[in-house]
Amino acid sequence: MATQSIDSTHLRQYFEHLAGNTCFMDALQTTSDVDKKLLAFGDDPGLANTVVHLRLLATKNDGLVPGSLKEALRVYFVQCRKKKNAARSEKRTIAKALGLHATPPTAQSLAATGMVKVVIRDRFDDTGYKRGTLLVDRGNEDLVGSGNTALSVPVDESWYVIEPDESIIFIDSKGIGSVSLAVLRGKCSKRPDLLTYVNSVIDEAVNDRKGVRPTHGGDLIQFGWNAGPRHARVFGLVNNLTSKRLSMTARQQKDSRALGILALSWNLLVASLPAEVSTSCIEAINEAGLPSMTVKGNNSDSGYTLDLPDGSLCFSTAERAPSEGYMSQNYESPIHTDQLYAPYAMNWVTFHSIVDPDQCQLHGDRSSGGNYVDVSLRVVVKCATDTVMSMQPCFKHGTTLAREGVCRQGTAINFSKHIKKAFDEAIAIEGDVKAMVTQLAGEKE
């Protein structure tokens, strides 16, 4: 950055003022908010407005700079270099632990590890199971309210129950070996701290944002792009923060955290699930042409940040999640179907635990509940922390009722047809929809 001329006396006083200011010198030592502290000393032409500019100015006028400020600047940039190298190393460690750079494995290669079971299983006739019917685990029938219709699962011995420690892939014999359902456990087991962070962001989202599907139990928080309310379909960014008094900075921080964990979820899901699933979804995404997930005030198509307790990590070139993502907590749904433009939906169960045994009251053949059920496949997936799944929501499915005192939550990536339809209609009218929506959101703020 070019500097404007300033007399040496004024410049010497400026450097001495910086060296004598405890607040600024402490900021250099801790490498925090240095630029902000620097601006407090004025923004006159010729004075530094960033610490990088200050180093250039000090180097050019070395004889005017007190020794204490020289040393503080030297230490500052050494510490910055160390932090940058440590962050780069930590990102590589995370990518390796989660297998984010690995080529997605095929179902056959997962089976070859001996840790994943592959089962050929075709779908059954599900016409006898009506949409809207509640699902309940056998032994938990006391959870069904009077007057409600419920299906107790497993219904009989023809049903398959996937245990909490079991990883399995179901293959449809009629679909040339296509994957019907994949359930893989422990994909983030080497980094439990990431699970803790993701769960903290989900907790924050549940408390701060308005959910969708209010007639279902629990909370389902949408993020990214949507089609607006049913009575006024319009393609745009989700705007569900309940507090209207949040500052722009606070909103952007919350949005950035949500964007970050959904991007992490997407990259983990694509790298972990069978290639047959990942490849077909990516092909559908490319064909649909919807923009990647983003937030107001961020025009980039890639990159995300994880605000971990030991410091933020910025994956500046990493892929973001597709346009539509969700965070859920204790979410329950009756038997239903979803219409997607991709063949699968994906989710990551990040937490499942009995947090209050007294309230849960497990005895006899009761269970915690909250399990995913593929009705036409006749499969019950026992819920467990750190489970990645792919499913085909165009077939009847739902979740079983859960007992009080149980907490479960996670993230999901979906590909709703009605959102794609709203996007296609907006494209036909407006052209560059993402640019238009981003601009309008910025003007509104």
Image (tube, rainbow, N blue to C red):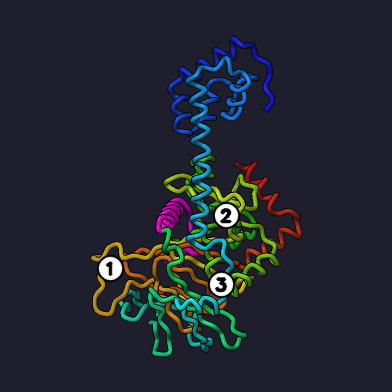
- 371 lies above or below 290: below
Label 3 sits on residue:
105
Label 2 sits on residue:
238
Amino acid tagged 1: Cys
10 Å crowding of disc 2: few (<14), some (14-19), many (20+): some
Of callouts 1 and 2, which one flags the residue occurring earlier in the amino acid sequence?
Answer: 2
- 1 lies above or below 215: above
Q: Point out residue 407 in the picture as x, y percentages from the top left corner.
A: 36, 63
Amino acid tagged 3: Pro
Give the CA distance from mark 1 to mark 3.
39 Å
Q: Nearer the viewer, mark 2 or mark 3?
A: 3
10 Å crowding of disc 3: few (<14), some (14-19), many (20+): some
Q: Point out residue 175 in the picture as x, y percentages from the top left corner.
A: 61, 85
Q: Is residue 246 visible?
A: yes
Amino acid tagged 2: Val
Task: Please tell me which residue is depicted at 50% across the width and 55% down the height of the picture.
Answer: 261
Label 1 sits on residue:
360
The disc label shown at residue 309, or none: none
Q: Secondary structure at mark 1?
A: helix
Which segment is the magenta one? Answer: 192-217
